[in-house]
Image (cartoon, helix red, strand yellow):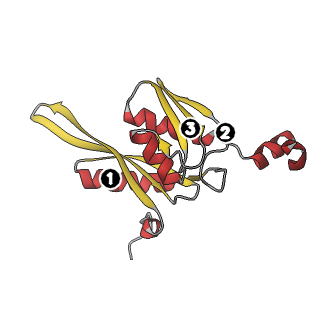
Amino acid sequence: MARGRKKPKDDYSEGFEERVIYINRVAKVVKGGKNLSFTAIVAIGDKAGRVGVGLGKAREVSSAIQKGNEIAQRNMKTYPLSDGGRTIPHPVLAEFRSTKVLIKPAAPGTGVIAGGAVRAILEAVGVQDAITKVLGSRTPVNIAYATVQALDELESMQMVANRRKIPLEKLKR
């Protein structure tokens, strides 16, 4: 058997939902004509608080999606959810380059009020009720990364209590 880098296992496809957010065709003009390639933004999540986003680039669409999927799997993180995993714990505003994403918790039954990349990522993480707004640039790549950055800023009550070094009971009062 040849030695080298191990191929990633395909077990991540079990129990995870893959969402292709955006596919972009790019062309590089060279001496002999145009070289076409594709970029794909992919979100993969378990609908229970874990999600990862990846940007794959390749000469073919299917290869770009596969690469994006592998990168998303490597970037997967766990995020705190509240209300039994239905919504986020608190409002959050995150910025990535010239894009800002605002995500607010919503009452049960509201649904995910979002579009495009934000909706795909929030549904992959398992959020069922949230209100969002994208401010600034509407580039899908920037929106995806700003959404992940917003999720990174989420803190559960236990995390806040640990950070402040006070008991959870004192925080709840």
Tell me which residue sits at (30%, 50%) in the image. 64
Which of the image's four quarters has the C terminus? top right
Which residue type carries mark 2?
His
Give the Cα separation between the discs numbered 2 and 1: 32 Å
Q: Which residue is mark 3?
A: 149
- Taking depth in this image into account, of 61 and 33 the one nearest to the observer is 61
Secondary structure of the residue carrying tag 1 is helix
Asked whether, in this view, residue 167 is left or right of residue 70, the answer is right
Q: Which residue is mark 1?
A: 65
Instruction: Look at discs 2 and 1 and give the one toward the viewer.
Output: 2
Give the Cα separation between the discs numbered 2 and 3: 14 Å
Tell me which residue sits at (65%, 41%) in the image. 154
Give the Cα separation between the discs numbered 1 and 3: 22 Å
Q: Which residue is mark 2?
A: 90
Which residue type carries mark 3?
Gln
Q: Pinpoint residue 153: horizontal percent, then vertical percent.
A: 64, 38
Which quadrant of the structure image shows residue 172?
A: top right
Mark 2 near mark 1, Cβ–Cβ under 8 Å? no
Mark 1 near mark 3, Cβ–Cβ under 8 Å? no
Q: Pinpoint residue 75: horizontal percent, then vertical percent.
A: 51, 51
